[in-house]
Amino acid sequence: MSNAKLRAGLIGLGSMGRHHCRVLSELDGVELVAVVDPMGDKFGAARGVPILESVEQLVELGVDYAVVACPTALHEEVGLQLAEAGVHALVEKPVADTVEGARCMVEAFEARGLVAGVGHIERYNPALQNLRARLEAGELGEVFQVVTRRQGPFPHRIADVGVVKDLATHDIDLTAWVTGTPYVSVAAHTVSKSGRPHEDMVAAVGQLADGTMVNHLVNWLSPLKERFTSVTGERGCFIADTLTADLTFHSNAAVATEWEALQAFRGVAEGDMIRYAIPKREPLLVEHEFFRDAVLGRSHEISTLRQGLRTVEVAAAVLESAATGDTVRLGQADAAVPSGA
Ligand SMILES: NC(=O)c1ccc[n+]([C@@H]2O[C@H](COP(=O)([O-])OP(=O)(O)OC[C@H]3O[C@@H](n4cnc5c(N)ncnc54)[C@H](O)[C@@H]3O)[C@@H](O)[C@H]2O)c1
């Protein structure tokens, strides 16, 4: 890495922003020059980096790129300011709170030839990275179904969007990314039990372009935390736990079970179960390394803003289905099938 460091800024020093601050301030080849947060440094996370009150001040200071970690409803406004100023941006997920907002951002960054990415952090989880490589290598054969569960308690700080845009966007992005296949339809039910204006529980069923069936159960109403992804196919079933970054494979039947009493529990035959030993790097650090490399014009695997737009479109379709009771079909995806550069 050359001595000329990239100058980076951070916008939003809240629950997620403080982690970006830690990673950015230690990232090789990058200098975190300032953080913007009108509420100051409430977590004591700034590590001596100057705190500014506005994006204008950050732009005046001069930065090569900025990480946007303010509330989702502000992403569009902040993103457009950065694009206007010619600053590359890594925007937290979801890209924006509306499809129109996400599309405006894509157009603004693309028109200026700027690098813009979305913080779909599950792509950098070691379990899912390993799973994707195994699917690409054909280890599962034909993929039949992807199931995700993302359950946990209510986050009081998130008030601007519901659980579909805030959390299910992780599941939507990871499903399209891990299979390399876009969604073509969704149907969903939501409920709102916490008294907030937005939904806090969703059950969605979808279909990918190759016919793969998809199920997502996502909520803020559970006293437990679960981050589960399973992919079932011709040769068995992969299970990824993105809390522990573990990946397990249950292979299809290889050995017939003759012991009748056991058949009742295990089925008539069982195959091997393997938990893979995989290197576990911090997903946020890997996300930042790729974004830095993208800004430097090197090979990278960022989640582009355009892919993030597709995720917001699928989330909007989930909400439309829940509101109308209809299955919603999605139009052609421009660049929805993710790939590295
Ligand atoms: N990738 C992930 O896993 C992940 C996890 C949590 C949150 N997020 C995303 O990060 C974003 C922030 O979420 P959070 O949980 O950190 O919320 P938060 O409320 O904890 O933090 C938001 C911060 O932004 C600040 N802020 C408000 N207006 C601002 C402005 N105009 N300019 C600069 N800062 C401003 C607030 O003072 C606050 O400190 C959301 O888009 C959320 O979806 C992503």
Image: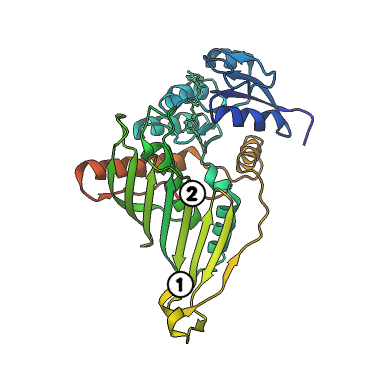
Q: Earlier in the sequence, mark 1 or mark 2?
A: 2
Q: Are marks 1 and 2 in contact (CB under 8 Å)?
A: no
Percent position (x, y) of residue 205? 32, 54
- Residue at (59, 24) in percent of width and height: 10
In the figure, residue 287 lies in which quadrant?
A: top right
Disc number placed over residue 227 in the picture, else none = 2
Label 2 sits on what residue type? Arg
Give above or below for 29 relative to 235: above
Percent position (x, y) of residue 58? 59, 16
- Please name the colour scheme applied to the rendered image: rainbow
Residue found at the very far bottom of the displayed protein: 258
Give above or below for 43 relative to 232: above
* Label 2: element kind: strand
Q: Is residue 264 visible?
A: yes
* Label 1: element kind: loop
Q: How many marks?
A: 2
Label 1 sits on what residue type? Glu
Q: Is the CB of mark 2 within 8 Å of ligand 1? A: no
In the figure, residue 297 lies in which quadrant?
A: top right
Residue neighbourhood size for the residue with mark 2, other residues' Cα within 10 Å, grouped as few (<14), some (14–19), many (≥20):
some
